[in-house]
Image (tube, rainbow, N blue to C red):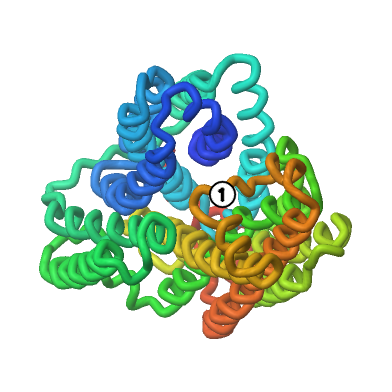
Amino acid sequence: MVVFALMIAMLLAMLDNMIVGTAMPTIVGELGGLEHLSWVVTAYTLATAASTPIWGKLGDMYGRKGVFLTSIVIFLIGSALSGMAQDMGQLIGFRAVQGLGAGGLMVGVMAIIGDLVPPRERGKFQGMMAGVMAVAMIGGPLVGGTITDHLGWRWSFYINLPLGAIALIMVTAVLHLPKKRSQTRIDYAGAALLTIGITSLVLLTTWGGTEYDWLSKQIVGLGILAVVALVAFVLVERKVSDPVIPLRIFRNANFSLVTVVGFLVGFVMFGAMTFLPLFQQTVQGASATNSGLLLLPMLLAMMVVSLIAGRVTTQSGRYKIFVTGGGALITIGLGLLALMDVGTTRLTSGLYMAVLGAGMGFLMQTTMLIAQNSVEMKDMGVGSSSATLFRTIGGSFGVAIMGAVFTNQVKDTMIEKLGPAAGAKMTGGGAQMDPKTLPSLPAPVKDAYAHAVASGSHQVFLWGAIISVVGFVAAWFLKEVPLRGSGPAKSADADAAAEKPLVVEAI
């Protein structure tokens, strides 16, 4: 029952962006402010990333349950306010409130499971978490479209309220954790510097190459600000008695290595999720309405493999093979996707996506498991939040860098196919080259754009494969430290006796 309540809360955070993305054209049509469209997503992402480590630290200091319930309430308040927004400015502000709560939802779920379930047994829940992710990614766009068409876009936010109410009631009723009251002071300086650094990084990767040129004073200034803030953050954390992110957790080689792997998982996953539907809609002529179903081979493979890996980890206590195997499959999957062109069938691309999904299935929850097993119980919150944070930042970097590569390749190919004048005109800022408008364009332009998108996708996945090699290499240096709650010399009865104090204390 506890895990079911946590999965509902996790679904809240993951489902929101998927639903809202489908409703955005309608929202812009009613509220106006097209020029501020990107901020609706950026405000949510920024608030989520910046608040994640702070939520984790608060849970360590004052107890998980109260902090987790607070994050749910803040998320629901942001959802209700977003549904009542009267202009784009209000919507952006309320989305930031929503993102603030979402940061606590994700890390709260991971840290509570880390508290209640020994790492040896935690693999059982990997398939459930992957299933929630698959439901959100597949069902989000479909639910979002249905809600927007029949109930109006405001219900894209209001739908969170009944789900959140269920999560609140269940968590309050069935989750029993020991109460804490820390006597230490909150590291306000560290939290402020970390927030500035993360905000600068997310804005840099969001705006770079789109809103501003990569070498513009705005982007360079954000880069300098990020470096200065993060260096100052490290210096502050080395001096304070109770840092928001204890640097000692990075002295553990396994934690540092798996953080790198997690960063690359986020990089690859968010990049693939962004550009695969675009390839299938533009090049293969698939319907945008089924954008969630287009990714079904990847998501199903991810869910099934994650479930299998979790069961094997629970039974054997072995996990390094899944991290190295996952790194290899992600590299192979991206390499196969880089082979796609205008003649690639949906069946072929589906098989390639399944390989990539299998790799992500091996890594998604296993990396979190290793991160939690590498820190002391008192640091479970900051360990979970740090791993989540690096995965989130990896996703932001992935979308930004892959987006820049894709855009430049599409422009170059269009100029090559249509000539400098026509190619620049068709890919300029005022051009309408989305899948809906393609059928109305002349045949030569459609053919050129299909080739351009295929070429851009090739570059994106090729560079993704090259970068993912780093994760594969990092996985080889992991040491297979025995998972807590396991041991080859213990009998089943001894294991049960060893775990009993943890369960008693938690409940």
Pick whichever, 312 or 185, lies toward us.
185
- Residue drawn at 40 percent across, 21 percent down: 80
- Residue drawn at 24 percent across, 48 percent down: 61
Q: Residues within 10 Å of mark 1 (few under 14, many from 20)?
A: few
Furthest residue toward top:
151
Q: Disc 1 designates what residue?
A: 431
Q: In x, y percent, where is residue 378?
A: 31, 57
Marks counted in the figure total 1
Kindly tell me whether residue 200 is visible in this rendering: yes
Q: In x, y percent, where is residue 449?
A: 70, 58
Is residue 427 shown above or below 74? below
In the image, 438: left or right of 479?
right
- Residue drawn at 47 percent across, 44 percent down: 109
Q: In x, y percent, where is residue 111?
A: 42, 49
For badge 1, the amino acid type reads: Ala
Is residue 108 shown above or below 394? above
In the image, 223: left or right of 366?
left
Is residue 100 shown above or below 187? above
In the image, 57: left or right of 373?
left
Q: Quadrant of the C terminus?
A: top left
Q: In x, y percent, where is residue 154?
A: 49, 20
